[in-house]
Amino acid sequence: MADPLLTLTRLDAHYNDFQALFGIDFDIAEGEVVAIIGSNGAGKSTLMRSISGLITNGASQISYRGEQIGALRADQIAEKGIALVPEGRQLFPSLSVEENLLIGGQIGRSGPWSLAKIFELFPVLQERRDQASTSLSGGQQQMVAIGRALMANPDLLLLDEVSLGLAPVIIKSIYDALPQIVGGGMSAVIVEQDISKALSVSSRFYCLQEGRVSLEGESGSQTREAISRAYFGV
Amino acid sequence: MSSMQDHTVVRSSRASRFAALAGIAILILLIAAPLWAGRADMRLLGELFLYLALASLWNLLAGYAGLVSVGQQAFVGFGGYLLFALTIFGGLHPVLAIGVAGLLGAAIAVPVALLIFRLRGAYFAIGTWVVAEVFRLTFAQISVLGGGSGSSLPVSIVKSVAANRTMREWTSYWMALGLVVLVLAVVYLFLRSRRGLALTAIRDNELAASSLGIDIWKTQFQVYVVTAGLTALTGGLIFLQKLRISPDAAFSVNDWTAFVIFIVVIGGIGTIEGPIIGTLVYFALREFLSDLGTIYLIVLGVVAILIMLKAPKGLWGLIRERWGIELFPLSHRVIYSKPDKEK
């Protein structure tokens, strides 16, 4: 395997006195799509928040392109080329669809993604570009959240529970867009509760349980029983 | 004002185009006030402009940047005292002194920000007040500026603004008008810029904004420093009109912060139009009720409570919800000159 793009080494994460992650080892190579699965409270979103700098960690616990970034602020990490599509979308309600996208592009990294490209990927957003982001349906809001992250032209995209609360047909249309997104060589970490969806789009996966990695491997390599055991801990 | 028009052509509603034209008409009318207004009216208008400037600045700070300061009197007083110090001891022309006071106000805001930006939320608010008290106590120690009892601007300096009283009053009126136009233009252009978009994003959702690469600290710092500078400028003008300064008047939390917060809250925080409406309402209440003494303050309090309960977005929020108009077109920004963002 090539040099990893991002490596987590014995990563711990805390919310005040509560420890949410215990010694996570994780890596992702350039151009790779890795899934993180696990039940509620397993630490998936905490892991995303740690990588994106919303939780501060020990500097050496996260390294990106050989650089220790664990102690950097979220905006500094974003500048390095790691973009987060946060759980629950977290759009800016005072801004229009287009303005939400433009905010993502403010970081000024060059690359293939532009407003026009996002509208090509999700044509419905072009029709609604001037609308308040809150007036869109859940699926369209999720498209804005993904587009907003892509506008930063990241090398690593973190997708946190993009299917949460959406109808299956919408989830399918969002996942159908994924090959176009990562086709250009972008790496992606996908956090997902739906195991089969996660395994079908990724090449490797990590399963978390109570803040620890309970299973990892190639996405096609494990039996459903092994995954269930790692997922539920029974 | 002309630059405001350049922008509104791009993506304005009929209401905002009308507002731009009406704004220019009103501005011309106000510039020509000496032709139609009496001495008392012009004094009142001048004071109204200064309050509108303070309110717009506090609104930018609290309503957009989320920095709820209750210590902006620190910069009002600082600007006022610097006007006195620079003219009396530095021999500067009062108008120049006010400009320098503004720059120094921004400069002193840098170390203040480094200190109080370590505090968040309510602690930040209290911290700003403490800083203002430190300013007040410090200036009260300076005996050459009159110490605790303050001092008056010498007649020779007052006369250097303009030779006769009428011309002086006109000049100070025009300066107040110029200041409020400057402040509104700065606030408006700031909010229309890339930084304004970032500011709105921070106000909406700090976590999402930071994970998109927006440096929250830097953005808020810039707003704080710019606001402090313009507030000090306003303070200089206020005390050029008053001609007398004392620590209690210069650093009054009631006059320069409480009333200003009242104006912004009843007008509508987080909108440019809000402080304008709020200032008009505040001055209307004051003109009709101030003879009542204490009752006037009780009425102000009741009005503030009622509006916070019934219309948390202020009077302008009510108007905007009902008719969907926006006089300063902020929400339909499309023109971005960076080529990679153009289609």
Image: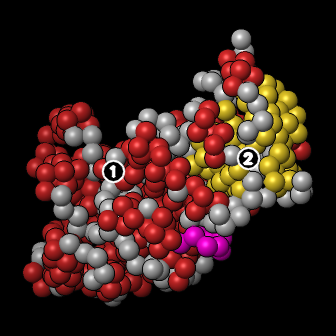
Q: CA distance from mark 1 to mark 2?
A: 32 Å
Q: Answer yes or no: do the residues labelled 1 and 2 have beta carbons within 8 Å? A: no
Report the chain holding disc 1: A
- Whether residue B237 is visible, yes or no, is no
Residue lying at 63% horizontally and 43% vertically, measured from the top left: A200
Q: Secondary structure at mark 1?
A: loop
Magenta span includes A111: yes
Q: Secondary structure at mark 2?
A: loop
* Residue in the foreground of this view, choosing between B180 and B340: B340
Q: Amino acid at mark 2?
A: Ser
Which circle, 1 or 2, is nearer the viewer?
Answer: 2
Of the numbered discs 1 and 2, the one sitting upstream in the chain is: 1
For the residues tagged 1 and 2, is the chain the same?
yes
Which residue does the numbered mark 1 point to in the structure image? A136
Q: Residue at x 27, y 40 (%)?
A: B312
In the rendered image, residue B216, in percent from the top left (x then y), is placed at 60, 54
Residue occupied by mark 2: A203
Residues packed near mark 1 inside 10 Å, few (<14), some (14 to 19) or many (20 plus): some
Within the magenta stretch, is there residue B321? Answer: no
Q: Residue at x 57, y 70 (%)?
A: A113
Which stretch is magenta?
A107-115
The disc labelled 1 sits on which kind of residue? Answer: Leu
Asked if residue A82 can be seen in this view, the reply is yes
Relative to B243, residue B200 above or below: above
Total labels: the figure holds 2
Task: Give coordinates of residue B71: x percent, y percent.
Answer: 50, 48
Front residue of this view, candidates A26 and A134: A26
Q: Which mark is residue B99?
A: none
- Quadrant occupied by the C terminus of chain B: bottom left
Residue at the location (47% across, 46% down)? A172
Please identify the quarter of the rendering in which residue B113 is found.
bottom right
